[in-house]
Amino acid sequence: MKSKYSSYSNQVQTYIDLSGIDLKSRRRDILYRRYYLINFLKEKTDLSLSSIAYIFKKDHATIIHAVKAVKDLEIYEDFKAYTALEAEEFPMDAPAENKDARFVTYSKVPESLARLQIKFLENYV
């Protein structure tokens, strides 16, 4: 499914909003899904740890932990089962994003998301 957003960070942000992934939950299924998305952004974009943390409302240490945890969890079937939807939407074999791709055309982004992205870009990029 092709997204109307031009960057992985926007796609993940929108996916989080629409799928209802609770960013504060510690339930294993939600935690694994969040870890997968964090790892996807780390692997496929040039975003800093702080920038990824901002998207997930976490700090950079949590992002480091998530990336390390995914490396250990990838061999387990329950991790694969919990993250199947995310893996379909955001496959790890997707091409990496170049630096300029994360700057979107604001006419394609809903107004509230555009304001949030402008604030993000002013503060973290």
Image: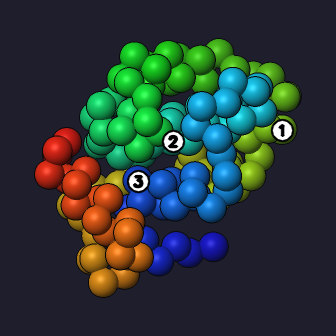
Q: In this view, does 67 lie above or below 16?
A: above
Q: Mark 3 points at which residue?
A: 9
In which quadrant of the rendered image does the N terminus lie? bottom right
Of pointers 2 and 1, the one earlier in the residue sequence: 2
- Residue farthest along the bottom direction in this orientation: 107
Asked if the residue at tag 3 contacts the one at tag 2, i.e. Cβ–Cβ closer than 8 Å, the answer is no
Please give the name of the residue rendered at 71% of the width and 35% of the height, measured from the top-left corner: 30
Residue 8 seen from this side: no
Q: What element carries label 3?
A: helix
**In-image side of 76 versus 3 (left or right):** right
Q: In which quarter of the image is residue 110?
A: bottom left
Asked if the residue at tag 3 contacts the one at tag 1, i.e. Cβ–Cβ closer than 8 Å, the answer is no
| Closer to the eye: label 2 or 3 | 3
Q: Is mark 1 on a helix, strand or loop?
A: helix
| 40, 9: nearer the viewer | 9
Amino acid at the residue labelled 2:
Phe
Q: Which mark is on residue 40?
A: 2
Please give the name of the residue rendered at 79% of the width and 38% of the height, measured from the top-left corner: 82
Please give the name of the residue rendered at 67% of the width and 30% of the height, measured from the top-left corner: 25
| 17, 96: nearer the viewer | 17
Gap in Å between the C-alphas at discs 2 and 3? 10 Å
Q: Name the residue under label 1.
A: 81
**In-image side of 13 versus 89 (left or right):** left
Please give the name of the residue rendered at 14% of the width and 51% of the height, measured from the top-left corner: 122
